[in-house]
Image (cartoon, rainbow, N blue to C red):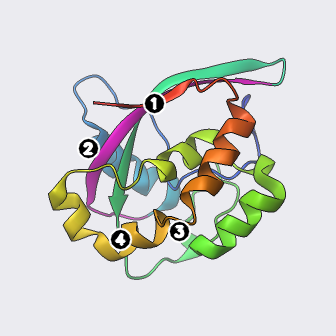
Amino acid sequence: EGKMLWPNEWDGTVASHPRESETYVSSAERRMPEEIGIDCKVSYVNKFEYHVPYKDIGSENEICGTLIGAIDIFDKSSLIKDEISEIKWISPDELKNELEQNRDVYCPWMVIALYFLADSDSTTLEKFNSLITKWASDDLKPVYENAIKHYIPDNNWRLVR
């Protein structure tokens, strides 16, 4: 609620900026207990760059690292209210429908991360195959792309190698 850009919109599970000398992985593993009250080992997927304005207020111009991990159980009571106002679990089909009906409730960088989810190294793809396959399916890719183009019509987003 207190965020200047994209307040009250759905974002990825943990979004943070790494500190100096931190990797994307160590930053996420530090922030997860602080944001959602859990510990989880994550794997690096990729990174992407984007630039998107937000109304007449400001803009985002960032390089984001995408990470993936899995947990067995989540207790909503461990949610850190100062960091996150709400959390929900959603299936790929539900997200597809929501992006087709009301994409404005999602932060654009979350959709970009999903668009590039399958662009990872073979070890990560193999380790998280069932999860990545569901979220990076051929029928979701054009939905992600349309949502991204809604926010960023001039293609100011790309995978960074």
Residues under numbered marks 2 and 1 in contact, where contact means CB atoms less than 8 Å apart: no
- Give the mark toward the camera: 2 or 1: 1
Kindly identify which residue carries mark 1.
Answer: 158
Residue 20, horizontal then vertical, whole percent: 28, 22
Q: Residue 68 carries which label?
A: none
Residue 153, horizontal then vertical, whole percent: 70, 29
- Give the mark toward the camera: 4 or 2: 4
Q: Name which of mark 3 and mark 2 comes first in the sequence.
A: 2
Which residue is more in the foreground, 15 or 137?
137
Residue 43, horizontal then vertical, whole percent: 25, 55
Kindly identify which residue carries mark 3.
Answer: 78
Asked if one can make out residue 34 in the rendered structure from this viewpoint, the answer is yes
Kindly identify which residue carries mark 2.
Answer: 26
The image shows residue 23, relative to residue 52, as above or below, that is below
Q: Is residue 55 left or right of residue 133?
A: right
Crowd tier of the residue under label 2, counting other residues whose Cα lies within 10 Å: few below 14, some 14–19, many 20 or above: some
- Mark 3 to mark 2: distance in Å? 21 Å
| Residues shaded magenta | 38-54
- Mark 3 to mark 4: distance in Å? 17 Å
